[in-house]
Amino acid sequence: MGLEPVISFQNVDKRFAFTKEKPQSVLETFIALFSRRRQPKKSTESLWAVRDVSFDVLPGQCFGIVGRNGSGKSTILKLIARILRPNNGRILINGRVSALLELGAGFHPDLTGRENIFLNAALLGFDEASTHAYYDRIVEFSELGDFIDMPVKHYSSGMYMRLGFSVAIHMQPDILIVDEILAVGDQAFQTKCVNAIMAMKDRGVTIIIVSHNINLVRTLCTHILWIDKGIPQAYGTVDEIAAEYVAHAYQKPGELASVNFARTGSGEIEITSTRFLNQHNEPKDVFATGEPMTIEIGYLAHQPIVNPEIGLAIFRQDGVQVNGPNTKLAGVDLGTLHGAGLVRYEIAQLPLLPATYVVSTAVHDGRSHQCYDFHKQAYNFRIQAGMAEELDGLLQLQAQWQQEKLQPDTV
């Protein structure tokens, strides 16, 4: 018999209703005349934050929820924390929940950090004596020092996060919920928080994480729910879902990464085109791991330019740079350019794993570092699962496994 889930969502819907009112004052009437949101009378509208969401989280799992802003991730967390109640469906929660949902949540602004620690502990069912046993560890982890006796309304966002996270992890939760708030604060403390989460994971605490940092989700989580506009898109293991989410969650392949991408340069040479070609020199925007690909860059030199450098940089959609080759590093002498031409960067076998990638292209003078033209993260292509033997990470290395059986020592 399998383990019983500690969290179970069964066809859960959550709807928010809001009313648009008829303007009452002369100023409101005047503003409404020029507002696209004008309503002639009161009208009640509904926003479905989540629709028909179902998933199970087993004891000790680290479960990630990913999706764009406004997709319903935080609503799901508030349903788990019992801050919200569903309109339809059933939610089962087994265990003490400690939630870090947003800055200042659960804190009274006029109370000090010390007083808020005891307030939060009381809300979680701890008596004063039990809270005293954890108090020193909470303050030490938060690194707030003397600020612990300052009213929290004077705290910075980073100080709020330090105290909130420290309280959440020290209250012996069965289930820890961490929203994107973890992104607030300095890098050193973020690393400290991630280490604390991993230690709790090793102790068997069930952890729910919402984050736009897909690499963090890959590192910590075993299972993922991908949600968009309140509707589940995929639910399964991190290996199954993460690559699909990265590849599809941003924009349609074949379009510019940004319609108004950043372009700089003096203009003596222009980049006129950037194309991704398959082995038959046909333009494509979707490739498979292991396939050949050529990046073709067209240029137009308006005057003779002696041996410029043409290069590119490939980035995964989350900002991780893959490489940054150019003609000079490759030992290619372009000679004197004048007029139109093409250069090609030929990749025999793509080592990239499934994701969406964006490309910058540039042409400049390597001696004076003068930039003639630079298209910053202007083009994209997508890698889908093909001949890849791996699904997690950045690259598939050209390597193979070997086994050697050793004979046991004889006496």
Image (cartoon, rainbow, N blue to C red):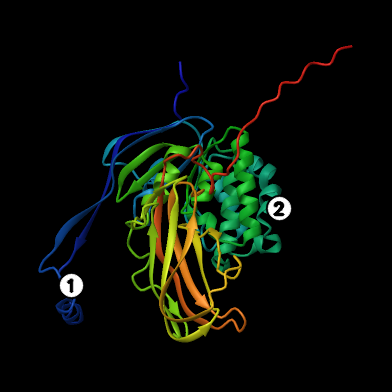
Give the labeled residue for mark 1: 36
**Residue at (55, 50) in percent of width and height:** 119
Is 143 situated above or below 326?
Answer: above
- Quick one: label 2 or label 1, which is nearer the N terminus? 1
Name the foreground residue: 233 vs 230: 233
Q: Residues within 10 Å of mark 2 (few under 14, many from 20)?
A: few
- Residue drawn at point x = 71 percent, y = 49 percent: 136
Could you classify mark 1 by the number of other residues whose Cα lies within 10 Å: few (under 14), some (14-19), or many (20 or more)?
A: few
Q: Quadrant of the N terminus?
A: top left
Residue 122, position as x, y percentages in the image: 55, 44
Task: Looking at the picture, tell me which residue is in the foreground, 258 or 201.
Answer: 258
Q: Are marks 2 and 1 in contact (CB under 8 Å)?
A: no
Tag in front: 2 or 1: 1
Q: Which residue is outermost to the top?
A: 411
Q: Which residue is more in the foreground, 361 or 162?
A: 361
Label of residue 140 in the image:
2
Residue 155 seen in render:
yes
Residue 339, position in %: x, y?
41, 81
**Residue found at the very far left of the displayed protein:** 40
